[in-house]
Structure formats: structure tokens, C-alpha cells
Image (tube, rainbow, N blue to C red):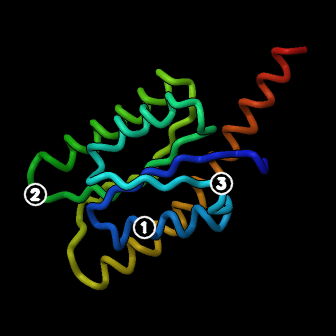
Amino acid sequence: MTHTRIAYVQARWHADIVDRALDGFSEVIPRTQIDVIDVPGAFEMPLMARDLAATGRYDAVVCAALVVDGGIYRHDFVASAVVDGLMRAGMDTGVPVLSVSLTPHHFQETDHHKAIYADHFVSKGREAAHAALGILKARSSLRSVAAA
């Protein structure tokens, strides 16, 4: 899929961890095929994903964020809104929108937790790249069957 173009949206909240997902993602899909867009946090990703998908320029949109439990309802509220919004963006535009958003309940600002989640984001980035390529291939096959 040499002509595949991916929009990759990443939240700047906990950027030191979230940025690792792009590292893993670009191990599978070359950076020359990825446009990286920064947004302030996870809550802003669905609107950006919808707008990027609607341009018709991208085969898929991938969004990455870390939504942590701060001990109040915000964690669940934000996580639910983000997942629902990303799904709606994909459904409304017909462009696959994938999430590399993690929502740990017990994240702490320690070097140990930061290292664990940074490593995990690399793996999740690779998984998201394979998922993006997989859904694009499946949709391409579907179009081929419909055309026959």
C-alpha cells in the first residue's frame, strides 16, 4: 500500500508517553505516509479526526492519547466521550478512525509508571498500524467484490 496516507492525531497531555505510540506506528507504516497533527488533549481528538477524514485526503485517521484517572468522574467521562466521538467520526465520514487511547485507572506520575506506559504505547502503536492496514485491505476487498 505505497499510496496509503494516514492522519495521525496525538494528544499533548502526557506527550512524553503518548509520543511513543507514533514510534511504534512508524515501524510499520513509513513516516513519509503519515501526517502528524497535535491536539491539546484526548477530548479534542474526535473533532479533529472528523475534520481530517472529511478532507478526503486520508485513507485512515489514527488517534493517540492517555486519559488518566484523576480520582474524579472526568476519567470515565472523557474516555467515553472520546471513544464515542471517534467511532462517530468514522461512521459519519466512511473513513476508518482508529484509537490508540489508553485509560489506566491507576496511573501515577512516577518514573516506573511512565516507563511501563511508554513501552506499552510503542506496542499499541504497532498494533494500530497493523489494524489500519488490515481494515484498509478488508475494505478494498469489499469494493472489489461489489464491483464484480
Give the structural element (helix, strand or loop) at label 3.
helix
The secondary element bearing badge 2 is classed as loop
State the image quarter where residue 76 is shown. Answer: top left
The Cα–Cα distance between marks 1 and 2, rounded to whole angstroms, is 24 Å
60, above or below 71, in the image: above
Mark with earlier residue (1, 2): 1
Kindly identify the amino acid type of the residue bearing the numbered disc 2.
Gly
Q: Which mark is residue 62?
A: none
> Alpha carbon of mark 2 to alpha carbon of mark 3: how far?
39 Å
Q: Which residue is mark 1?
A: 19
Task: Tell me where residue 5 appears, x and y as whole percent.
Answer: 64, 46
Residue at which label 3 appears: 33
Closer to the camera, 46 or 103? 46
Which of these two is toward me, 45 or 56?
A: 56
Mark 1 nearby-residue class (10 Å; few <14, some 14–19, many ≥20): some
Compared with 20, 41 (above or below) is: above
Q: Measuring 37% from the left and 70% from the top, which residue is drawn there?
A: 17
Residue type, label 1: Asp
Front position among marks 2 and 3 = 3
As helix, strand or loop, the secondary structure at mark 1 comes to helix
